[in-house]
Image (cartoon, coloured by chain):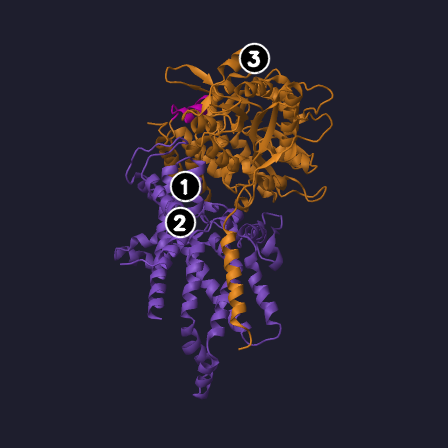
Chain colours: A purple, B orange
């Protein structure tokens, strides 16, 4: 096969970035994978192979299991709330209202703020203040002060409770009888403090989702809706059966973007609560950083990093495959 | 359609850029020039640079460090020490940056590190540091520093010989109880001498509607310190030391008793402890206005709390050793060592000589709020900053007390061990269960191979 001059020059042009990505992305991933199988647990590198012992050590730590729980819970709540709010805002704005640009900017603006700043401000807002004790009234702060809530029952960031199927729950016995007793662990539950972090993250990202949906809504031809109206569809039916299905690609893109943010979330939780009460707001990223750079257990830290990579890949790779198919079809 | 979709696309792409930029945060090292006060010595032509890395970037600590550096630069015109400070919580940021440089073989000429296992396990055991035996002998430090400190800064080599690895510049005390004097006097109380007394007093205070103990354990270490104080009171200095060398059994009944006390103490802390940092908790002792009742009566914290109270112009505070630990000084210190790969070893040794000397420590410590590690120190020249009342009290105790190391501040245990203990304490504070905590503590000791 004869290679055209055009092709040679295009290969030459692309070569440096291919090389850089190969070394600095895939090379370092491979290196991290290798480190996760060696002993290296002091500052001086120690490349004695230990097989999967690092992974075993991590999964034996209850903290890591809680981190996985937190990541799953955070991802579900964060994506669901951001999509719902984003879609609602987009629909409200897409009404040819006056000064639409102003509203759009107001809703998108939180995204321009860094997660650290968001975290610090929301930490102030969500600090509960002191609960009342004998003779002394409560001294609520933040939201509790604003809405006159009782700090004793509205603990926000400091709430150590985890909602899970405990022994008091009627289905507890049933689950144990049918061999699903593992579901009744606090490690399969919803830590309340984590929802405060979700609140801050949703505040920051729902405007971004709104913009995505707005673009999607604008791309739907008016003729489709007109035709449906002529056929006697209500506005809700138009939304449900025409607009919403056509927004599927947007929803998927938004889920991927939000999903990888939530799996890697670090700065927001560090600024707001750190590991939180009873690791209620701990994340794999924070665990990895502390294991590697505070405890000098680089082998175990690398193992956490690899697991995080697999989690993100589990979301992103199917999306890329799907995207590729769409392009081929189109 | 009214709005061009191109505009929307532009918004999206900008938004995406912002999103990707959000996730990175970097620490910027700032090289702080020495204090611009009168008498600052500038670099002489041909002087050799010495780079000292610290995490002291603000307040009294950076003033103090710059003062002692300036003293060195004035006395030794052939050298010029510069303070490369890396800001960030108790050195956690500086440490990551330092470790990179040590690993790369280009460490600073000397750097700040907590004395004890944070230095020994991280840098000495892997072989990155030179020992300072000649400095200790030549300057008589083996008699000027208390035995407790010598034990903490030294390590035995494979032949069993003892070597010294860092020069402690200051000493902070971890086991101090701070209280609001007005609250105590109006309830006819004195500082509790034992944890049993503490629990009785706490119940009384709680009945009066005041939170007995303020804790700010965001980042958990404040609760870790509380646990250390309870263990220290229950076990005494020798057996407490033994916890960290493997001679005291973590599964013993004494430890169980201490952990049960710890659980009781935790019932008397403020409800929002996990949202607060130590200084915010200390502020709970300060009444909102003169004569008002403060939010809390006591806090247990290292003696840097005195600086916090002084900064807030709050003078109505009293202090005592944490309950049951009178006569024991739980110490932590910032120290400086000599990396094997340092470029200017002669100059660094001159600088370290000043840091360890009585004169040098009397320049630094009045600013920092700590006390000198060197027992010969304690009388700064009249034209310099003097020690505060608290510091004078602490110096008196320092000369007579038994010295034990602090786990939370890197003196007693390796960073990895400390991390595992903090993990166990975090779980305990949320769901107190003594057997679970004790099992976890015993397992942590085995995991770091100190216990068999």
Residue A284 part of the magenta segment: no
Q: CA distance from mark 3 to mark 2?
A: 55 Å
- The answer to whether A157 is drawn above or below residue B439 in the figure is below
Q: Quadrant of residue B416?
A: top left
Q: Residue A44: x, y in percent?
A: 40, 30
- The circle on residue A162 is none
SS type, badge 2: helix
Q: Which residue is mark 2?
A: A21
| Circle 1 Cα neighbour tier, 10 Å, few/some/many (<14 / 14–19 / ≥20) | some
Label 1 or label 3, whichever lies nearer to me, is 3
Which of the image's four quarters has the N terminus of chain A? bottom left
Can residue B188 be seen here? The reply is no
- The circle on residue B139 is 3
Q: Are marks 3 and 2 on the same chain?
A: no
Q: CA distance from mark 1 to mark 3?
A: 50 Å
Q: Chain of mark 1?
A: B
Label 3 or label 2, whichever lies nearer to me, is 2
| Circle 2 Cα neighbour tier, 10 Å, few/some/many (<14 / 14–19 / ≥20) | few
Q: Quadrant of residue B189?
A: top right
SS type, badge 1: loop
Span highlighted in magenta in the image: B238-248
SS type, badge 3: loop
Label 1 or label 2, whichever lies nearer to me, is 2
Q: Are marks 1 and 2 on the same chain?
A: no
- The answer to whether B12 is drawn above or below residue A137 in the figure is below
For the stretch drawn in magenta, what is the main secondary structure?
helix
- The circle on residue B433 is 1
Q: Are marks 1 and 3 on the same chain?
A: yes
């Amino acid at each position: 096969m004869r290679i055209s001059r055009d092709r040679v020059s295009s290969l030459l042009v692309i070569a440096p970035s291919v090389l850089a990505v190969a070394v600095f992305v895939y090379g370092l991933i491979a290196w991290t994978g290798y480190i996760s199988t060696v002993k290296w647990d002091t500052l001086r590198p120690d490349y004695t192979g230990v097989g999967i012992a690092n992974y075993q050590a991590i999964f034996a730590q209850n903290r890591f299991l809680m981190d996985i729980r937190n990541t799953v819970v955070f991802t579900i709540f964060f994506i669901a709330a951001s999509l719902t709010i984003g879609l609602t805002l987009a629909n409200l704005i897409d009404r040819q209202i006056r000064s639409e640009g102003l509203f759009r900017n107001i809703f998108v603006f939180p995204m321009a703020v860094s997660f650290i700043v968001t975290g610090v401000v929301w930490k102030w807002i969500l600090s509960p203040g002191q609960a009342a004790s004998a003779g002394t009234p409560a001294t609520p702060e933040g939201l509790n002060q604003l809405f006159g809530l009782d700090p004793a029952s509205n603990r926000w960031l400091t709430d150590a409770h985890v909602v899970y199927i405990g022994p008091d729950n009627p289905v507890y016995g049933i689950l144990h009888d049918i061999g699903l007793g593992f579901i009744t662990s606090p490690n399969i539950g919803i830590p309340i403090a984590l929802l405060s972090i979700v609140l801050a993250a949703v505040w920051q990202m729902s405007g971004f989702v709104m913009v995505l949906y707005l673009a999607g809504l604008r791309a739907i031809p008016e003729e489709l809706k007109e035709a449906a109206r002529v056929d006697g569809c209500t506005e809700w039916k138009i939304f449900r059966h025409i607009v919403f299905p056509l927004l599927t690609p947007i929803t998927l893109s938004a889920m991927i973007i939000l999903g990888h943010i939530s799996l890697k979330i670090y700065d927001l939780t560090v600024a707001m609560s750190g590991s939180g009460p009873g690791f209620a707001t701990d994340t794999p990223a924070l665990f990895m950083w502390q294991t590697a750079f505070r405890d000098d257990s680089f082998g175990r830290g690398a193992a956490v990093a690899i697991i995080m990579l697999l989690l993100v890949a589990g979301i992103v790779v199917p999306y890329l495959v799907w995207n590729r198919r769409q392009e081929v079809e189109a | 359609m009214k709005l061009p979709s191109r505009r929307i696309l532009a918004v999206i792409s900008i938004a995406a850029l912002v999103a990707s930029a959000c996730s990175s945060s970097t620490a910027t090292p700032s090289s702080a020039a020495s204090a611009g006060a009168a008498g600052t010595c500038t670099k002489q032509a041909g002087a050799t640079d010495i780079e000292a890395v610290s995490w002291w970037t603000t307040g009294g600590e950076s003033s103090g460090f710059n003062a002692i550096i300036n003293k060195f630069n004035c006395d030794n015109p052939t050298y010029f020490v510069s303070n490369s400070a890396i800001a960030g919580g108790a050195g956690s940021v500086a440490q990551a940056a330092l470790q990179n440089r040590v690993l790369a073989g280009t460490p600073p000429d000397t750097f700040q590190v907590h004395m004890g296992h944070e230095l020994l396990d991280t840098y000495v055991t892997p072989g990155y540091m030179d020992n300072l035996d000649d400095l200790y002998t030549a300057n008589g430090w083996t008699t000027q520093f208390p035995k407790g400190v010598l034990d903490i800064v030294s390590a035995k080599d494979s032949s069993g010989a003892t070597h010294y690895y860092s020069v402690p510049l200051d000493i902070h005390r971890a086991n101090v109880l701070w209280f609001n004097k007005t609250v105590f006097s109006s309830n006819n109380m004195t500082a509790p001498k034992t944890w049993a007394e503490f629990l009785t007093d706490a119940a009384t205070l709680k009945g009066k509607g005041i939170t007995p103990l303020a804790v700010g354990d965001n980042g958990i270490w404040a609760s870790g310190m509380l646990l250390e104080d309870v263990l220290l009171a229950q076990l005494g200095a020798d057996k407490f030391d033994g916890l960290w060398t493997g001679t005291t059994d973590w599964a013993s009944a004494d430890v169980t008793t201490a952990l049960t006390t710890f659980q009781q103490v935790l019932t008397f802390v403020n409800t929002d402890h996990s949202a607060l940092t130590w200084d915010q908790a200390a502020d709970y002792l300060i009444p909102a206005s003169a004569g008002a009742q403060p939010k809390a009566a006591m806090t247990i914290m290292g003696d840097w709390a005195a600086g916090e109270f002084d900064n807030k112009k709050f003078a109505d505070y009293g202090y005592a050793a944490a309950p049951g630990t009178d006569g024991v000084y739980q110490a932590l210190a910032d120290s400086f060592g000599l990396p094997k790969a340092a470029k200017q070893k002669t100059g660094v040794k001159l600088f370290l000589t000043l840091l360890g000397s009585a004169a040098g420590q009397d320049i630094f410590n009045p600013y920092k709020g700590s006390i000198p590690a060197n027992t010969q120190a304690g009388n700064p020249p009249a034209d310099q900053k003097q020690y505060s009342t608290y510091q004078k009290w602490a110096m008196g105790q320092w000369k007579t007390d038994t010295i034990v190391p602090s786990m939370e501040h890197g003196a007693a245990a390796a960073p990895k061990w400390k991390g595992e203990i903090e993990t166990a304490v975090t779980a305990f504070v949320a769901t107190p269960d003594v057997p679970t905590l004790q099992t976890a503590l015993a397992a942590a000791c085995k995991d770091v191979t100190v216990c068999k």
